[in-house]
Amino acid sequence: MDIFFQQLANGLTIGSIFALVALGYTMVYGVMRLINFAHGDMVAASAFVGLTIYTQVMGQATSLVAVVAIFFLAAVVMAGVGIILERLAYRPLREAPRLSAVVSALGASLMIQNGIMLIWGPQMRIFPELIPNISWEINGVVISLIQVLILTLSLALMVALYLFVEKTRMGAAIRASAIDQDAARLMGINVNKIIAIIFIIGSSLGAVGGLFIGLYYRGITFNMGWQYGLYAFIAAILGGIGNIPGAMLGGMLLGLFQAFIAGYVSSTWADAFTFILLILILIVRPTGLLGERVAEKV
Amino acid sequence: MNILKRYGLPIFLVVLLILPNLLDPRWQAIAITFLIFSVVALSEDIVLGKAGMFNMGHALFFGMGAYITAILNSQYGWPILATIPVAVLVPALFGIIFAGPIVHLRGDYLLVVTIGINIVFIQVLQNNLGGVTGGPNGIFGLDGLNLFGWQLTSQLSTYYFAFIAMLVTLAVMRNLEKSKAGRALHYLREDSLASESIGINTRTYKIFAFGLGAGLAGLAGTVFATQYSAVSPEAFNFMQSVLFFSIVLVGGSSIPGIFLGVFVMFILPEIFREFSTWRYFVFGFAMILTMILRPHGIWPASFGKIPKFLIKDTDHGA
């Protein structure tokens, strides 16, 4: 039973990271019908940006203010990168065939990933210990302060996002653009602005996710974005892509699933089991768990 | 332009026929790589370009062919050439069985499922399932080519082996373009619903395209295993699939476009070796730029083999 609760705690931690990153995919997909392949690499870039802010700007301070400032600055930087990315790589292709935008997204992913390598080098870097390494043992289950922080902060951000999208005027505009961009434009919604906002929100949530990855796993590499990006993307699809609560649910489920596979079966098979789960779910429910059944537009 | 269209491919093939005799061994090896990856990219074009299915796991079929050749040769002592039928048929069958339950998925979902199956495949290889794949190191020390007792172990004979594989692929694609199946694929890519309503069994043709593409990729796998006399999982990971996917779309899913794509993606880096760290950064930039400037690819395919009596009618209408 110890393994069960231990893996439950680990699964909820990585699940909330997946969910944060998955939100970036799902929001962009919801409005633009585009898989933003570069999102995973933006997450990786965020960890490196955070590292540089820590060493260069903060002078290696680990006070509470400094940590909050690192999160804030990294989110701002990545939001900026997100806007530039949308402007240069995606906006010119909005009217182009679907596959052209996919290739552009793949190109952006390659560029960011190798940009990280050119700037910070190909070797693994160690992320600073910003949060004190405190852990509690409850009945043989070890829970660390970082895990608690990741879980509570992620949940808070997700609730805030949900309220923003469901309760505010801007959120209504986002939902309208997701349903029909042309109709939204006719109602006086500035769709370009909405897309920019989506990239800002998605990229900053991804940036927080990237810093969490750095804090939790400590070792960061330039090509880790594909790995986490793919997991987060699967999470988004599990929940039904384009669906915000779906991404949260999918992220948590995927995190738990992977943790239990690692705990009870073997971590060397985690990827294979994850994808087999995905394929099975897509065969049974082709639009994900919470996705609505929509006919392809004719 | 017409002359280029008509004689371009034959001239290109003649050049490829003579080329290896003028190259030193290092460039011969690079030329073989060019041929092999061209075959894989062309076979990906059948699935992605011709049938319009977002297949981002094509390296799986390539790897499956290579591993089948390697296992049959190293474990069971089959000659390389004798493994070809198995290395073509098993990936083709796997493609058909795998495609069955997933071809109905919407584009992006299909993309993720194919990425997934590729990653599962790599993990199976790395974990050495059944004890025949050699784990992360792969299998090495395969025999050379052997035809009725002649030892064809020189690099030149590997080159011509690859060349024949490419001729076969080109012949298949040419026939596909002229045949009923090719037209069916063309229509279902343009408009799946409309093609279904005029009586094309879209599901069958989609699965057919998957099987055909997978079989040809398997053939390329055999050549690959021959060239290196070894196979390892990294050569077939899903990053390779991403490259093949991009080559087809950046090239414009036409034969010259794909050759160009393979050349840029795999041969140019050999020429500019000193810039190797910048390789993927530049590619990424080039991919974005190409798509913005030419959304249909550098050399867009035109479907030119529609029978004349079908084209006439549309002219009247216009």
Image (spheres, coloured by chain):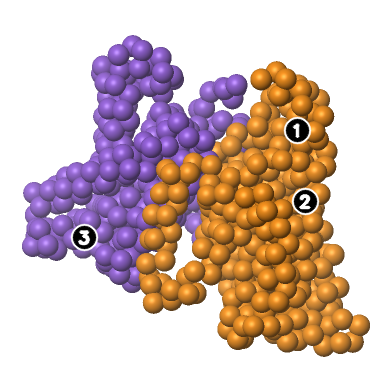
Chain colours: A purple, B orange
Please give the residue where the numbered disc 1 appears in the rendered image: B202
* Cα gap from disc 2 to disc 3, whole angstroms: 54 Å
Please give the residue where the numbered disc 3 appears in the rendered image: A51
Q: Residues within 10 Å of mark 3 (few under 14, many from 20)?
A: many
* Cα gap from disc 1 to disc 3, whole angstroms: 52 Å
Q: Residues within 10 Å of mark 1 (few under 14, many from 20)?
A: many
Using the image, determine if residue B218 lies above or below residue B160.
Answer: above
Query: From the viewer's perspective, is the residue at label 2 or at label 1 nearer?
Result: 2
The foreground one among B133 and B298 is B298
* Cα gap from disc 2 to disc 1, whole angstroms: 21 Å
Q: Secondary structure at mark 1?
A: helix
Q: Which mark is residue B174?
A: 2
Q: Disc 2 marks which amino acid?
A: Arg
Q: Disc 3 marks which amino acid?
A: Leu
Residue A61 in view (yes/no): yes
Question: Can you name the residue that lies furthest to the top here?
Answer: A187
Upstream in sequence: badge 2 or badge 1: 2
Q: Is residue B146 left or right of residue B157?
A: right
Q: Is residue B143 left or right of residue A144?
A: right
Q: Disc 1 marks which amino acid?
A: Thr
**In the image, what residue occupies the spot 82% across and 42% down?**
B179
